[in-house]
Image (spheres, rainbow, N blue to C red):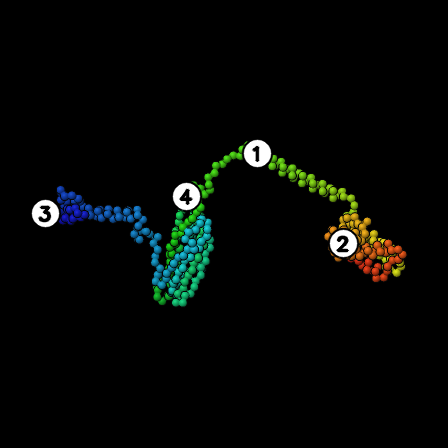
Amino acid sequence: MICRSQAGMESCCSAEGSDGNRKAVPGRRGCFPGMRALLRLGFFGGVLLVAFAMGRLPGWAQGSSDVIAPPEGMSFTTHLEHTAVWVGDQFRYQIRVEHSSTFEFVMENLNKDNINMDPFQVMAVDWHTDSMKDGSTRLFLDITLVSFATGQESEQIPQITLFYFRTDRSAIGADDSAAESLTVPGPVVGLRTTLPPDASDIRDAMAVTSWPDSRWVLGYAGWICLMLLLAGVGWESWRYTQSRKTRKGPDRRKAMEAIRSRWVSTVPSEFSDPQVVAGFYDSSYQNLKEYLTFYLETPAEGLTADEMQEEMQRLGTDVAFAQKVVTVLGACEKVRYAQNGAASGGEAVQSTAQNMREILSFGAKQ
């Protein structure tokens, strides 16, 4: 009889008969074929079930989530700009890879469009390399991320795979010339939010209340006031337009131009005759007074030279223009009201004529 003790309990499974064949021995506990195989299978299954419940599966049972260690001559580190971010804030995730000159990474086609970092959103991707003193190379990969997830205290950044080639062809065979990959696991970043714990929605719950019927009177009153305001503005605009059309008297600029043309036509060709000079001063005095009435938009016919100077100072008229006006009016008044009635000629009348031309030209430019 073949007997073996297991788990402190004797189990006789079989015995040899007189004909040399095995047969079960009656009256013994647990004696049936395949007992040991079933016990081992049950024990192993129970271990796996407990390990799965505790989240501690063996490495071979975790599938593709295992990260393969980088080859010799290569190492990597990850860095976060912030260990915790607010919802909607951008942060930088940096990967640094140090490798020897026998490796060459393929980074040309790496951009934000072909990098999947769900649940994070990729905003920008940038990379550059630095040469070290010992001949190795340091690769910097900067990824700008943003998270809009809510209701979680933290989130792990997904792993990213970088591809490289071995540049030392003499040390590798033809089968190893294809691109290889380096998988970099992502760190965990904390997520901060202004929402209160166990919030049912992003916005606060607010009861919708209807507008009381009595308050609709204010809305109607506002509309009526607005209509009255628009009607008043339209009425005043129409009255202003009609008053401009019905205003009596010539146009200001046209009247000033007519006075200038009239005075130019009265200027004599020479000032040798005293009577001609006296007529020139009288015409210049009258035309200048009429011209100033339109230019200053104030009556000027009854003002003397001194009174005209005070009026122009009050109106803020140009100083040079006012000085020429006072000079011409003073010269004209001196000739008109002289006791002997003599008219000054020569350079004085020529200067008066030149000042009149400048006064009438200056007013036409305004």
Residue 87, given in percent of the width and then of the height, sits at 45, 48
For disc 1, the neighbor class at 10 Å (few under 14, some 14 to 19, many from 20) is: few
What SS does tag 4 mark? loop
- For the point 77% across and 48% down, the residue is 298
Residue 49, given in percent of the width and then of the height, sits at 28, 46
Residue 74: quadrant of the picture: bottom left
Of labels 4 and 3, the one closer to you: 4
Residue type, mark 3 in image:
Ser
Residue type, mark 4 in image:
Pro
- For the point 39% across and 67% down, the residue is 134
| Mark earlier in primary sequence (4, 3) | 3
Per the model, the C-alpha gap separating discs 2 and 3 is 149 Å
Per the model, the C-alpha gap separating discs 4 and 1 is 40 Å
- Residue indicated by mark 1: 216
- Residue indicated by mark 2: 363
Residue type, mark 2 in image:
Gly
Per the model, the C-alpha gap separating discs 3 and 1 is 112 Å
| Mark earlier in primary sequence (4, 2) | 4
- Residue indicated by mark 3: 18
Q: Nearer the viewer, residue 16 or 70?
A: 70
Left or right of 81 in this view: 345: right
Q: Is residue 40 visible?
A: yes
Residue 211, given in percent of the width and then of the height, sits at 53, 34
Residue that protrudes farthest toward the left in the picture: 18
Residue 95: quadrant of the picture: bottom left
- Residue indicated by mark 4: 197
For disc 3, the neighbor class at 10 Å (few under 14, some 14 to 19, many from 20) is: few
Residue 248, given in percent of the width and then of the height, sits at 78, 44
- For the point 79% across and 55% down, the residue is 326
